[in-house]
Amino acid sequence: MTEFCIKIYRFFRNHRAVFWVSMIALYAFFGYFASKIYLEEDINKLMPSSKNEDGTTKLAFANLRIKDKTFLLFEGKNGASVEHITEICDAFIDSLESRNAAMDSTQQVIGNIFYRLPDDLMLDVIDYMSAHLPAYIDTSVYTRLDAMLTYPHMKLQMKANHDDLLSPVGSMFPELIQMDPVGLRGLLMEQMKPFTEGAAGSYKTLNGHFFVQDSTVCVVFITPMYSATNTGQGSTLFRILNDQIEQFSASAPDVKISYHGTPASGFYNSWRIKSDLKGTIIGSLVLVLIFISICFRNYNTIPLLLLPVVFGTLFGLAAMYFIKGHFSLLALGIGAIVLGVALSYVLHIITHYKYISDPEQVLRDQVKPVCLGCLTTIGSFMGLIFIRTELLQDFGLFAAFAIVGTTFFSLVFLPQFLNPRKNKLNHRAFAIIDRINAYPFDRKKPLLFTILATAVVCIGFYIAGGTQFDADMHNLGYKAESTSYSENLLRSKTHTGDKQKYFASSGATMEEAIENFEIMAAKLDSLQNIGLVKSYTHTNQIFVPLHVQQERIDAWKNFWTGERLQLVHDLINKTAPEAGLIPNAFSPFFEFATADYEPDALYEASIIPEGYQST
C-alpha cells in the first residue's frame, strides 16, 4: 500500500495536468450527487425499526395520527367572557385557514382544524342511534333492565321522564324520551361512562366550542398535513402560528394564545439541535484553526486541512445518495463529530511533514498507521448498521464513507500540495507540546498513585449509586418555554397530570383493527387491575365489531318478547297519567322495540367529525 501511494505521488508530480483534472473532476462528481440527496427531518428515524413483517410497531410512531395533533389553547385573562374567547378563537382560526388555503396545494401544512361541533351533529347522532341503538347495548344490561319492569320503578321513571321533557334537551328532542319510557338511557350512560370519562370527561362544549371544565380555556385541535416526526415540514406551520399569535396578542391582550403537542416539540427540538450544532461546529473549528495557524505559521495550512475533510463529506453524502437516495438531517448533524476524527488523519500527515519536509518520506512513514487507524475507525462506525434504528444506521454509513473519502484524499491528493520550500514550523509552540510528550509520566509513582486512587473513588461512587441515568425519554429533548407553559396549563385544567401513552391496534381492514382492539382492551384491563394503567379510553364502546353488533341485536330481539312488551304497555298506562303524561306519547317505544336492525359500521356513517376521528 505504501509503495502504491508513492507511485501515485510520483505520477501526479510528473503529470500536473492529470492531477488537477482528476481532483477537480472527483470533487465535481461527488459534489453534484451530494447536492442531489434529499435531507429529511423525521425524528421517527430515532425509533427502532419493527421486527414484524406487517410493520405494527411502526404504526404507533409513523401512521398513528393522534400523535400529530397540535393543541391550540385560548386562555381567558382578567375575567374574559366565554363569548369573547370564542370570538377570538373564531377570528384566529379563520385567519389561519385563509393563510393555509392561499398556499399552493403541495405546500399546504394544515390538514384539519377541529374546534367546534357541526350544528347538525346532534340531529345526525339521534337519527343514527335511533336506527342502530340495540347494536350498542351490552348484553349484560338486560338483567338489570328486566328488574326495572316493575310498577315502583316505572312510577319513579315516569316522574323522571316528565322532568326530562321540561329540560332544555328534552324540549328540543322529545323523541329521546318518548322512545325510552323505561329508562334505558340511564343504563347506557353508565355503560358508556368509561369512554366518556376517558375521551371527553375533561371537556365541555360552550357555544359549540371545546372548553375545559372551568370555562377559562378554549381548546383547538390542529392536524397537520405531515407526520409529527417530520420536523422539516413543520417549520412553516409554527412560523405561521407564531406570527399570528404575535398579532393577536397585540389586538386581544386579555386572551393568551399558546400551543403544544408532538409536532411542536419536534420542531423546537430540531431547531435547537441545528442551532447548537452550528454554533458548536463553527466555534470549535475556529479555535482549532487558530491553534493550528499559531503552531504551523503557514496560512495555507488551513485550506490543506479543510480540503480533505470537505472531500470526505461530499464523498459520504454521494455514497448515501447512491445507497438510499435520502439522508436524515439529524444524522448529518450528529455526523459533524466525524469531522474531528477525519481532521486527525489529515493532521497526522501535515504534522509529520512539518518535521521532515519530505512528502515522499511522509508517505513512507504515515501510510500504514493512517490506513490502520482508518480501518479501525470504519469498523467502529460500521457496527452501527446492525442497530435497528435508521438514524444511527445512516450515521454509521455516512461516517464510514466520510472517513474513507478523507483518508483517500489525504494519501492521494494532499501530498501534491506539500511544498518543502514554503514549510514553516513554530518551534516554540511545538517545543511545549514536545516537552509535555517527553515527560516520563510512567516513572512518577506519586502521579500514578493519584490517578489510581481517583479511578477507585470514581468507580466506588458510581457503584454506590452516586451516578444515575434518566430512563424517561420525555426528558430526552429540548422543551421550549412556550410549549411547556401550554402543556402544563392544559394538564392542570383537565386533571390529566399522569403521562399518557398511545396504544394502537391495526389490521388489514378497519373492521379487523376494531376486532384486534377488543384483544388489546382485555390486556389493558388486566394492567389496570394490577395498577400499571390508571385508565384508558374505551374506544370499543362506540366502535363495536360487526359480529358483536349482531349478537347484541339478537339479544335485543330475544329480550323484547310479546309478554314483556305487554307488561311495559300496562305499566305505561298506569304510571304515565300519575306523572301528568299521556300514555300514547310513548307509542314510538313499541316501534323502536320491534323494528328490524342490521349491524352497521359507525366509521362509514359520516357522523363522527373528521377532526375527532384521530383525537
Image (spheres, grey):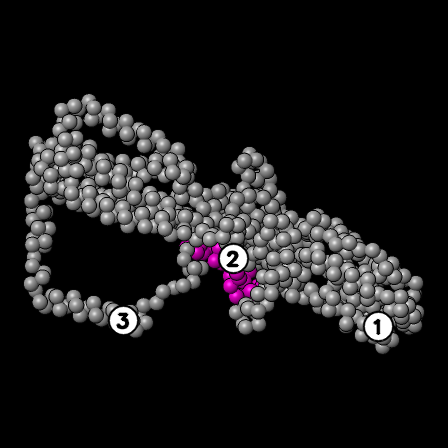
**Res 413 quadrant in image:** top left
Which span of residues is magenta-colored?
478-501
Question: Is residue 262 visible in the rendered structure shown here?
Answer: no
Of the 4 image quadrants, the one containing the N terminus is: top left
Q: Is residue 498 magenta?
A: yes
Taking 99 as reference, is 451 left or right?
left
Q: Residue furthest front?
A: 53
Q: Dot 1 corresponds to which residue?
A: 149
394 above or below 9? below
Q: Viewed as shown, does residue 602 lie left or right of 56?
A: right
| Mark 2 or 1, closer to the camera | 1
Residue 113 drawn at (x, y percent): 61, 47
- Which is nearer the eye, 334 or 223? 334
Query: Residue at label 2?
Result: 486
Which label's residue is closer to the chain start, 2 or 1? 1
The residue at 32%/29% (across/down) is: 29
> What's under tag 1, amino acid-wise?
Leu
Which residue type does callout 3 highlight? Phe
For the view shown, which residue lies furthest in the bottom direction?
Answer: 152
How many other residues sit within 10 Å of disc 2, few (<14), some (14-19) or many (≥20)? many
Residue located beneath label 3 in the image:
461
Q: What amino acid is at disc 2?
A: Ser
Q: Position of residue 271 (x, y in %)?
A: 41, 47
